[in-house]
Amino acid sequence: MIQEKNKNIALTGGAAAAEALKQINPDVMPVYPITPQTPIIETYAKMVADGEAATIMIEVESEHSAMSAAVGAQAAGVRAATASSSQGIMLMAEILPIASGSRLPVLMLVSARALSAPINIHGDHQDVMFVRDSGWIQIFSENAQEVYNNTFIALRLAEHVRLPAMVIMDGFQTSHSVENLEILEKAAARSFIGEYNPKKYLLDFENPVTFGPVGLPNSYFEFKRSQIEAMKEAGIEYENICADFAKISGREYGYFESYQLDDAEKAIVVAGSTAGTAKVAVDELREQGEKVGLLKIKLFRPFPYKQIAEALKNVKNIAVLDRTVSFGSMPPLYSEIIQSLYSILNTQYSIQPYIYGLGGREIFKEDIKKVFKEDWDNKEIKYIGLKENE
Amino acid sequence: MTDAWKNIEEGAIIKHDIAKSPRTGDWRYMKPKVDKKTCIGCGQCFSVCPEAAIDYGSERKADIDYDFCKGCGVCATVCPQKAIKMERTSIGA
């Protein structure tokens, strides 16, 4: 049943994240500003100052402290959230596996940005891909609406499997662009996330526990194995949570979005805001009679290998567009797609890696149409929008 | 046979059991001694003790739990009354 009180408003992706946070009303939010994440925390800080949310905001001295304080608050037994970008995430990196290893469902909004050097404040996916093995759930968002939706889905998933989660939006393209989106009615949003009832927490004086003990060679391996299982469980539960979310939002939601894939002969795989541009390119090429399609990544960790293999199994020609580099190797999304299709035997696929948009380099509809017209049999990485000498 | 990881404490969050805790006081070779007459119960040593091994009894004087005090001496350094003295001792004494 879709709530009649859902309303439409125009917000930046950052403000959409803050709007979702306001409805979640986390207990503690340790924050440190960094471009292009700042719109999230400054919008939220204003909401708190105006009495619209009752979160304790801690203005800490660094991102390392922000993540440490979030871990501490969550371990104490409350909901903690934070937000960051780029170098901020690099500084948090030490604490990220502590949050996941201690099974603390911290929520982080990420406005993805390039990494230094050279210094660049614009959008790409190098920061979030750098921490893809930190044990966090990672969900990509195409636009402000998805940022809003994913914030709820990520929180519920995180708390269900007791793992931290990142909601990722593209720096500037999404975080600073104003778009129209639909906001849930508060009561529906509140009931979707429910109360937070941790099983074990530090302020439970009746059942005292120790967080972060040593795990030496005789126990560490088993802790990691059980963490692997939690990620697996997240991959299963994600679908149920999305189904619940569809009930209150009227928006069908899946592991990924298939766009004109059913009869596609050529398809591109992409994550983030570029999927929006790619859909227009697909539409225009379809009008010209070309059988092209798109698969947009949403859930990236855990990666839905089986479901993606099923969606792509009939598309023989695939191009994977990564907005990041894995130096000395193939880009990460490309590697995941290869991994997904590896399970399908006796089929020869042609899969082409592309790198685009590093450090905020523009990617236009015409660039994507050009990609569709290229040959995809070369296993060497191709680049979109890389300058050439005149 | 069952997989051991299925029964392990989730997130390595373990039940706090003081009786099973290793007696870290065994590592100590410098022992803080509190002069209860000089101690004014200001609480400064309490707040800096890295082992949380200092308590205040009903008499409001610093009381050190030698089972866990490692003898780091921070309490003696911060004491404004110089009421805590570090004494060399044999290990664990």
Image: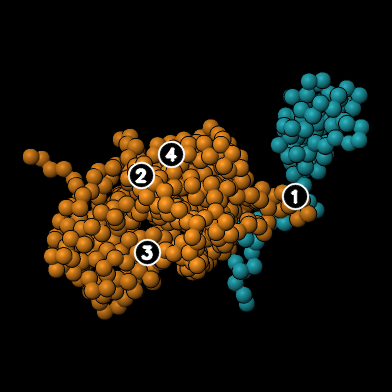
Chain colours: A orange, B cyan
Q: Subunit of mark 4?
A: A
Circle 2 SS class: strand
Asked if labels 4 and 2 touch by Cβ distance under 8 angstroms, the answer is no
Residue at 61% of width from left, 69% of height from top?
A: B6
Left or right of residue A299, residue B9 in this image? right
Name the residue: 59% across, 39% down: A51
Q: Secondary structure at mark 1?
A: loop
- Out of A91 and A170, give the one closest to the viewer: A170
Mark 3 residue crowding within 10 angstroms, few (<14) / some (14–19) / many (20+):
some
Tell me which chain the residue with mark 1 is part of. Answer: B
Amino acid marked by disc 3: Phe
The local secondary structure at tag 3 comes to strand
Look at discs 1 and 2 and give the one toward the viewer: 2
Which dot, 3 or 4, sits closer to the camera?
Answer: 4
The residue closer to the viewer here, B19 or A343, is: A343
Cα distance in 3D space between marks 1 and 2: 57 Å
How far is disc 3 from disc 4 in space, using C-alphas? 27 Å
**Left or right, residue A206 beside residue B35:** left
Q: Label 4 sits on what residue type?
A: Pro
